[in-house]
Amino acid sequence: MIRTFDEVLKKAESLPSVTVAVAAADDKDVLEAVQNAISHEIAQFLLFGNKAKIQEISKEIGLEIDGSRIFHADSAGQASKMAVAAVRDQKADVVMKGMVQTADFLRAILNKEKGLRTGKVLSHVATFEVPGYDYLIHVTDPALNVAPALPEKAQIAENVIQYCHSLGNENPKVAVLGAVEVVNPNMEATLDAAALTQMNRRGQIRGAVIDGPFALDNAVSVKAAEHKGIESPVAGRADVLLVPDINAGNMLYKSMVYFAKSKIGAVVLGAAAPVVLTSRADSPESKLYSIALAVVQSAYK
């Protein structure tokens, strides 16, 4: 089982060549991420955007890339469509968001006729290497699904389970989070957690151990779980934290980054190919980890 981002990078480096199509690549931060990935030999790239600007920035940062792998687009929206088309036409294996609004980027992916839809719910998973823990922790979904109902949460769980399998965790422990660790009829998140647990026990969701509801403390701390008398193979040892909504997920995500000083990489699951969805605030290191995770995911699929 892959337990650190160094191991993620080593795994990506060991895999056959993968091509990443970057939408709106005419940005220094984006091209530095491309440069880092190339230096680690984890991927090749097709760059879509303002060709002159891409070439100018590439020269500035010392990125050597063949001009035949750079494709001009008049707008970020057009660049997104072109990058998605490259994946759909099997010229690339992964699509990556560059300097384009997330909504415009996802619109290209979700286009019914020319996108990468599969009929599944798209969900975001953020993977953290947390100081003090000897394994990776995955949080889903902190970025895409605003207030998923039970059917959407079931698909989010299925997405992240397959993702964990790609990282060598054949039976991940999934904790479905709420504010409390008991079922409360007045708290819908706890009802959904109980339902997901039962769906897993009856074989409706396979490939993992799902339990909940859990409060955050007894999902990741054995001592907290023991103190509250919770007996579960997931309690205190969760690999996956499935959050109730985007508010909880986003705050947990940022707490892990800014308070816990965790290393992070993130991808979007559920499309016909892995999607790298980085933000301008992400560090170059985080962008590299995100690309590496997508490379590993692509090889697994």
Image: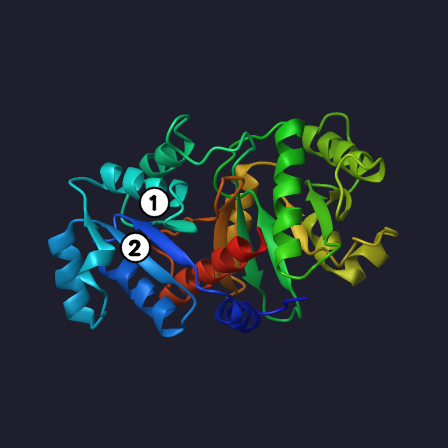
Q: Nearer the viewer, residue 3 or 68?
A: 68
Q: Mark 2 or mark 1, which is nearer the start of the sequence?
A: 2
Residue 300 in view: yes
Q: Nearer the viewer, residue 3 or 166?
A: 166
Disc 1 residue type (three-letter):
Ala
User: What residue do we see at 61% from left, 39% from top?
Assistant: 156
x, y (%) of residue 198? 82, 35
Q: Are marks 1 and 2 in contact (CB under 8 Å)?
A: yes
User: What residue do we see at 35% from left, 34% from top?
Assistant: 108
Q: Within the image, what quadrant is residue 127 found in? A: bottom right
x, y (%) of residue 96? 37, 50
Answer few, some or many: residues within 10 Å of disc 2's Cα (few below 14, many 20 plus, some between 14 and 19).
Answer: many
Disc 2 residue type (three-letter):
Leu
The residue that mark 2 highlights is: 46
- In three-dimensional space, the C-alpha distance between marks 1 and 2, rounded to whole angstroms, equals 9 Å
x, y (%) of residue 211? 78, 44
Q: How many marks?
A: 2
The residue that mark 1 highlights is: 86
Describe residue 283's horizontal placement relative to residue 139 as left or right.
left
Q: In the displayed structure, would residue 88 be above or below residue 226?
A: above
**SS state under label 1:** helix
Answer few, some or many: residues within 10 Å of disc 1's Cα (few below 14, many 20 plus, some between 14 and 19).
Answer: many
Q: In the displayed structure, would residue 234 be above or below residue 185?
A: below
Describe residue 213's horizontal placement relative to residue 22 as left or right.
right
Residue 254 in view: no
**SS state under label 2:** strand
Q: The N terminus lies in which quarter of the figure? A: bottom right
Q: Nearer the viewer, residue 207 or 301?
A: 301
Q: In the displayed structure, would residue 121 be above or below residue 258?
A: above
